[in-house]
Amino acid sequence: MTLPWRGPVAAVALLLAYASPGSAQRLLEWPVRTAPGAEALVDGAAAAFWNPAAAAGPAAPRGEAMALDIEGSEAVGIRGVALAGIVPLGTRTVLTAGYNHLGIADIPFTVNSPAPDTLGPSPRFDVGSHLFTFGVAGEVASSWWIGATLRYWRESAGTFHRDAGLGAGIGFAYHATTPFRPSLGAAVFTGRAEPRWLVGTEVAAPAMAGARDLRLSLGYGVAGGAAPRTVAHRVSVNSRWADVLTLSAGVDLEPDPGFSAVEPVLAASVRLGRYQLGMLREEIANGFGAAYYYRFHVTF
């Protein structure tokens, strides 16, 4: 689809379609993206926004903190920040917490949208969304984790729209130690939390070109709202060198009738002791440019 106009007004229309196709959708929604792979198996502090059971992963529970800067394209105009952390409770349980703020500033209000008004300067307003998430996860058997999460969100669009709500979710993760080290994760959410459900799997492949670890990932997810619901597919490969450099590449397929596209996702990160710096680039469907995610991560 080619739109004859760009800017924040176009961004609102895109967000409504990108977030969820149903009538019960939230006004402003954007993913907290740290890796191109299966969202149900996003590990570390970022798991607070997806599947809390994947927060600790196969390693022993440890404290972590993450700060993420979200930069949408100029066409979309969205900006955001995400903060998340993990606090271990003993050797089998962790607490997760996250905060995500998204916003589009200085949107012109037009009577004849998308065409600009010609009678003088248009009033302007901001769109903003705040998401708070709290979770707990525990190892219930060897290699098996179960987690639960609560979400509270509120959003506003000037004086035209104000809304808030609660959501909850439950998920599990499995990390095998057998050959190919397969992992499996799934999560389901209630209320108007996004997404509605996630499923993902990863397997280790023989290392190539000096890579210490090579993993293949496949994920599925469904956004909420009323029918028709669309299943998004994510396929990626993740490679790691000397526990310092990580490179990932994948594709995201979201076959929504109005925004069907296969878009590339690229990510890289560098670990320096307990600190990690990362960047992810995700193409936005239908020519709206790319979103960039800049991450700082520390392990305690």
Image: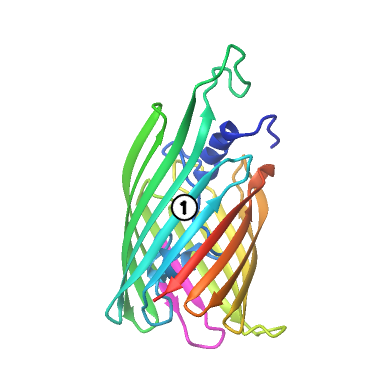
Vertical placement of residue 223 versus 273, above or below: above
Q: Which residue is mark 1?
A: 81
- Residue at the farthest top position: 119
The color scheme shown is: rainbow
Give the x, y percent position of residue 159.
39, 27
Q: Is residue 42 visible?
A: no
- Out of 223 and 228, give the one closest to the viewer: 223
Q: Residue at x 49, y 44 (%)?
A: 20
The reply, left or right, for residue 230 in relation to residue 287 is left
What SS does tag 1 mark? strand
Vertical placement of residue 76 versus 198, above or below: above
Q: What span is colored magenta in the figure?
A: 173-187
Give the x, y percent position of residue 182.
52, 79
Q: Would you identify the image quadrant in which residue 154 lies?
A: top left
Vertical placement of residue 46 versus 16, above or below: below
Q: Is residue 194 visible?
A: yes
